Image: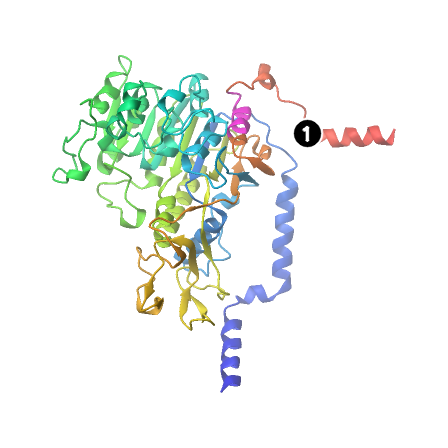
Amino acid sequence: MKALLLLLAQLCSASLVPEREKDPEYWRRQAQETLRNALRLQRLNQNVAKNLILFLGDGMGVSTVTAARILKGQLQHGQGEESLLEMEKFPYVALAKTYNTNAQVPDSAGTATAYLCGVKANEGTLGVSAGVTRDRCNTTKGQEVTSILRWAKDAGKAVGIVTTTRVTHATPSAAYAHSANRDWYSDGEMPPDALEGGCKDIARQLVENIPDIEVIMGGGRKYMFPKNASDVEYPREEKHRGTRLDRRNLVQAWQEAKPPGKVAKYVWNRRELLALNLSRVDFLLGLFEPGDMVYELDRNNETDPSLSEMVAVAIRMLQKNPRGFFLLVEGGRIDHGHHEGKAKQALHEAVELDRAIGLATRLTSAQDTLSVVTADHSHVFTFGGYTPRGNPIFGLAPMQSDVDRKPFTSILYGNGPGYKIVAGERENVSAVDFAHADYQAQSAVPLRQETHGGEDVAVFAQGPMAHLLHGVHEQNYIPHAMAYAACIGSNRGHCNAGARPAAPLLLPFLALLVLLC
């Protein structure tokens, strides 16, 4: 009997291998094509980057990237492993070290300050140096640091922010705000001492600090309206009401701050957004949910645009500026899915971010647009268990535990809400719907919220000077490299009269000549 089972297993395993992959020449041809592409990279793109796009997958660690690749391939009816994400087509890859100045495993605010403002900071703080202590409003003054969005705006470029979180959340707010606490979304979330100390809430800073941001899209309506004001989409739901203690309508304030003759449009649903004549719009504010936007798997296609749709609108808006643009795009709910232990939600968010990357690549040119894809941090998310080729990414491992004799899913978390004990033992996953969108994968340690991971994250780059992202870097290096490529910010000495430094490939050759002489 055992011999029969072994034979069946071997036959099944053999059937998983595509016929072409059984031929060694397939792998040799593939490797040679990769080699030819690598050799072409010796001809460096040293153009000035007219446009800059930074794609940020919040919580998109390397294990998430790999699992999203497999999911993408399986959604396209392939086995998955051989698939390629759009970001993986970028020719340059680096690693970024994500620690905060006071944290080995970072949070999204300190990391956002690093990859947007170019300086590392303490966890929980936004757009300020490490001289600021979280929650201490009185430590903020004089410690503000500016972002690459500001540098681009000062250089005359159009700028935009697109996110699937609140527009006042950690990632987007580091582009325009300076705050001792990432949670000060409106004055309704601020303690009395911070208000008395003169610190401004993040929503107010969005409207006041850089009033001429051309495109702002995401969630976060309730932080813009007076306390208890009913939400336009959910008028009967108390949790979605306005939060502002100062009774201000910041959407109105945003519109009134625009120069005479300029058209500023506010939209709150997908239909209004897609109906806009963008040639007649100078500034766009789209707030599609009271808080964060809905997960892509649960999204209402009538009321909420997808991330891809928002990115398409943003690029077409920003491309009207002849000097180019900077655009920050955040797939912010990858992180939320992981925190909730809902791997299916997280990975579908990652696939949608990748879809937006592909769309942006088609709408722009690598000759004048530097595109960078990275994450702020990782998560304690993993998948394994000796799964066979083409195993459903949300499926079971092909074995039972040799300790408790129960099956387990390939996807697991190091900690989080998926820790469940039933009758004194680990829950038997075969008794639950582990393929459900909201299934919480099992974890080793019980926590209400799963935590971030501390390992390095990937950085993918394409376009002018993309080769500057090439090894293991501190995370705060990213905006400096991007600014150098675009000739913005403080490091512009190489840009005089449009000149670029001598091709780096010449330097090793000259050094060799010196040695020979």
In the image, the segment drawn in magenta is 479-488
Front-most of 506 and 393?
393
Amino acid type shown at disc 1: Pro
**Label 1 Cα crowd, 10 Å radius (few <14 / some 14-19 / many 20+):** few
Residue 76 visible to an observer of this rendering: no
Q: Nearer the viewer, residue 200 or 134?
A: 134
Secondary structure of the residue carrying tag 1 is: loop
Please tell me in which quadrant of the rendered image residue 400 appears.
bottom left
Q: Main secondary structure of the magenta part?
A: helix
Q: Residue furthest right?
A: 517
Q: Which quarter of the figure has residue 59? A: top left
Which quadrant holds the C terminus? top right
Residue 155 relative to residue 275: left or right: right
- Rendered position, 479 above or below 164: above
The one nearer the camera, 237 or 5, is 237
Q: Is residue 266 magenta?
A: no
Q: Position of residue 314 (x, y in %)?
A: 35, 31
> Where's residue 422, x and y in %?
31, 66
The residue identified by callout 1 is: 504
Toward the viewer: 449 or 434? Answer: 449
